[in-house]
Image: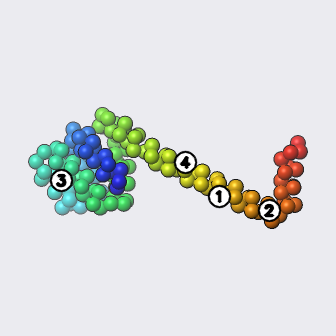
Amino acid sequence: MDKLKSKKERLCELLSRDPSYILEQCGDILSMNEFKEVQKQSSAPEKMSMLLKIIIEKGGDHCETFWDILRQHQNHYGQLPQLLCSSTQGKDQSVHVQRQHHTRSALYLFYIYFQAHPLQQFLLTAAVLLP
């Protein structure tokens, strides 16, 4: 939801080039009333602004589904792949930080285990050092 809010203006601009196309793709995440609400807007930018407003208000899974739709159809809109790429970089960094945390946690658990079990520590060390 936050990434939609932060990219809303740029998405409106890009998707306004062919609003009917993206609306067709969003059929599963919009109710008939929501679809009609978007359609009754007078200009393409207003339609896209309304579409994004509705999806953001729905939140959670609807926002993720919308991002999936954008990824699947990114080649239809010129600069959309670049916008999507820039929005996933933060996600990749978050995954990296989570991996570092899990690695540190695992090392700490090994340390605690081997402090309590010196024989296993010796055997592991011997297995690593001996060919």
Q: Earlier in the sequence, mark 2 or mark 3?
A: 3
Residue under the point 29% across and 57% down: 56
Disc 4 residue type (three-letter): His
Q: Which mark is residue 31?
A: none
On the image, the x and y values in percent for residue 61 come to 37, 59
Q: Of the residues shown, which amino acid type is indicated by label 3?
A: Val
Quadrant where the C terminus is found in the figure? top right
In space, the residues marked 1 and 4 are separated at their CA atoms by 14 Å
To which residue does mark 1 refer? 105
Residue 65 seen in this snapshot: no
Q: Nearer the viewer, mark 1 or mark 3?
A: 1
In primary-sequence order, the first of circles 4 and 2 is 4
Residue 105 drawn above or below residue 79? below
Q: Secondary structure at mark 4?
A: helix
Q: Amino acid at mark 1?
A: Ser
The reply to whether the C-beta atoms of the residues labelled 1 and 4 are less than 8 Å apart is no
Q: Label 3 vs label 4: CA separation?
A: 39 Å
Query: Which one is earlier in the sequence, the residue at label 1 or at label 2?
Result: 1
Q: Earlier in the sequence, mark 3 or mark 4?
A: 3
Query: Which dot marks residue 115?
Result: 2
- Give percent across and percent down for residue 109: 71, 61
Q: Which residue is mark 3?
A: 38
User: Judging from the image, what secondary structure is the residue with disc 3 in?
Assistant: helix
Label 1's element? helix
Estimate how packed mark 2 is, as few (under 14), some (14 to 19) or many (20 or more) residues with alpha carbons within 10 Å: few
- Do tag 1 and tag 3 residues touch (Cβ < 8 Å)? no
| Residue beneath the point at 65% across and 54% down | 104
Q: Earlier in the sequence, mark 1 or mark 3?
A: 3
Label 4 environment density (alpha carbons within 10 Å; few <14, some 14–19, many ≥20) = few
Judge from the rendering whether residue 116 lies leftward or rightward of residue 87; answer left or right.
right
Image-based side of 103 in relation to 41, left or right: right
